[in-house]
Amino acid sequence: MWNKDIETIDVKKLRSQQSKSLKKLVEKVYKVPFYKKRMDELDVDPSDIKSIDDISKLPFTTKYDLREVYPYGLCTCNMDDIVEVHMSSGTTGTPVVDAYTLNDIEIWSEVMARTLSMGGVTKSDIVQNAYGYGLFTGGFGVHYGSRKIGCLTIPISGGNTQRQLQVLKDFGSTVLTCTPSYSLYLAEAGKEMGIDFSKMPLKAGFFGAEAWSETMRTEIEAKLHLKAYDIYGLTEIIGPGVAAECECQKGLHVFEDHFYPEIINPETGEVLPDGEKGELVFTTLTKTGTPILRYRTRDITYIFKEKCECGRTHRRIHRLLGRTDDMLIIRGVNIFPSQIENVLLKQKGIEPHYLLVIDRVNNLDCLEVQVEMSDDLGFDEVKVIESIEKTIEHALHNELLIFAKVKLVEPKSIQRSEGKAKRIVDNRKI
Amino acid sequence: MIKQISVFMENKPGRLLEVTKLLASNKVNIRTLSLADTAEFGIARLIVDSPEAVVEILKNNRFTARITPVLAVEVPDDAGGLAKVLEVFSESGVNVEYMYGFVEKRHPDKALLVFKVEDPERSKDQLIAKGLTVISEKDIMF
């Protein structure tokens, strides 16, 4: 255990620590115009928050709010104290920004060190970090945790499968971090290259950034000969390191001294008791750069009532059970159909009637955008159609940062429905 | 110049059959048909009598169809017939988008070559100036 004192802390003590952190947090965020306005609207004063149980009096924050305050509107510290930013895509192209102080980077390193330690990682390990380095939080989050433990960290970043496998062989990596689907892709490609994973020193893998299942875990563990751990996080909160599985692999412990979880009824906003399924909400108790009150993740899960056999007292959430919105996660990247729609509306030669078809081919997610051509399109030449498809593919790539295949289809061939249009066909068997 | 019908079709089994069945039930005789195909879609190009009416029939039956003006050049059905026409295009820097040919009904010894070019009017004049026979709608026998 990386930090036994905190990870196995007595629950009463934990609540009292959380209460202190929350009071301090609320006083601080009340100075930010965005939060002051929200709290005033609900008629809540910082003095009303006396313990962690008063958290339900505080306003929620949504992705929509974050768009409003882009880029620095949530900063509670002096701008000079911000040392790093990360971003993920927002619903309509305005990204969500997380600005970190040195304090926040230290928290991030700590929770990621706990995460990796839960899977048995020590300073003797060699961590091949195949999450993308850059604005995406995956690469840096693992990097900070791995460095804190003192592992040899290989910052190989995502992609370039041949090199991944070469490095895996040559450096004797013992830990692999990437999306679960990419790990399976590596397994297949490695097999083709003649790598026998049962003879490789790999012992653990930390997989997150997209939904996966117990079936996938069995497959990954069998093919790569390692123990596969589920990790959870989101840019808005800190990145990876919000919650992670311990050696029992039964739910993900939330690092509650830093991130306070609630489950709410997504329709009414009412807080639900542990054990009941609803929308996951987080408050960052200790961050100083861009702390966030009661962030609605749109992820659906529940909090386990039972204590974990590992001895940790921090509560566990179940593997994610779904979303309350239409966000898609494709190759670890968050994508909203509205982003695609916005790109399509700007294109010539097509109608804004589209269907998104998602598949998993060779363990990699593939997104196909079927869109109707205009009735008056001069489609008589193959090159006209192909050039429109290429142009849209390029525009989508700029917006989504991943490749989506575009297929022009006949006008009026996409099924119209009354009410909410059925725009997504997800054929992935996760 | 003649009017060709272009029909866009997704690559699905039976799609071309549906087009031809529809035309048959409306007593439309297809004089010639050429297919451009890719992995995902095809474009059927047809020469028929009264193309405007046929496009309406297709559209009313939810096909994506339109009229495209193309050049039809009559050449003797001998060696070198096509080369002569292409020489004219080449000299004037005209790019042929696509072409196909068929044998004429009224002159079995002649062939009709159909060309899609960017500016058919201009190419037509250049072909006529070189003594080639560019034929019009009414010259085709259905």
Image (cartoon, rainbow, N blue to C red):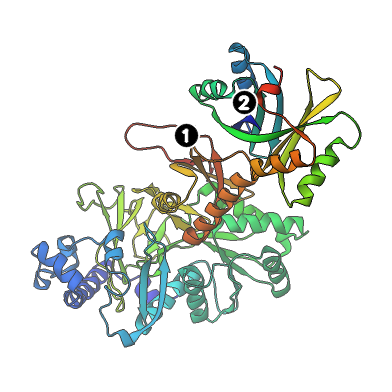
Q: Residues within 10 Å of mark 2 (few under 14, many from 20)?
A: few
What's the residue type where badge 1 is placed? Answer: Ile
Q: What's the residue at 42%, 56% (across, down)?
A: A251
Which label belongs to residue A328?
none
Return the x and y of residue B75 as percentages of the image width and height: 82, 31
Whether pointer 2 and pointer 1 mark residues with C-beta atoms closer than 8 Å, the reply is no
Quadrant of the image for the C terminus of chain B?
top right
**Residue sitting nearer the eye, B26 or A25:** B26
Residue A116, placed above or below residue B101? below
Return the x and y of residue A58 as percentages of the image width and height: 17, 63
Find numbered disc 1 in the image and state the secondary structure of the residue it sits on.
loop
What's the residue type where badge 2 is placed? Answer: Arg
Return the x and y of residue B47 as percentages of the image width and height: 67, 25
> In whole angstroms, how far apart are the C-alphas of marks 2 and 1?
16 Å
Residue A6, placed above or below residue B9? below
| Residue A159 picture quarter | bottom right
Q: What's the residue at 46%, 69% (across, down)?
A: A137
Q: Which residue is mark 2?
A: B15
**Residue sitting nearer the eye, A131 or A136:** A136
Residue A115 in the figure: left or right of residue A218: left
Determine the residue located farthest toward the bottom in the rendered image: A80
Residue A37, placed above or below residue B86? below
Label 1: chain letter: A
Which label belongs to residue A414?
1
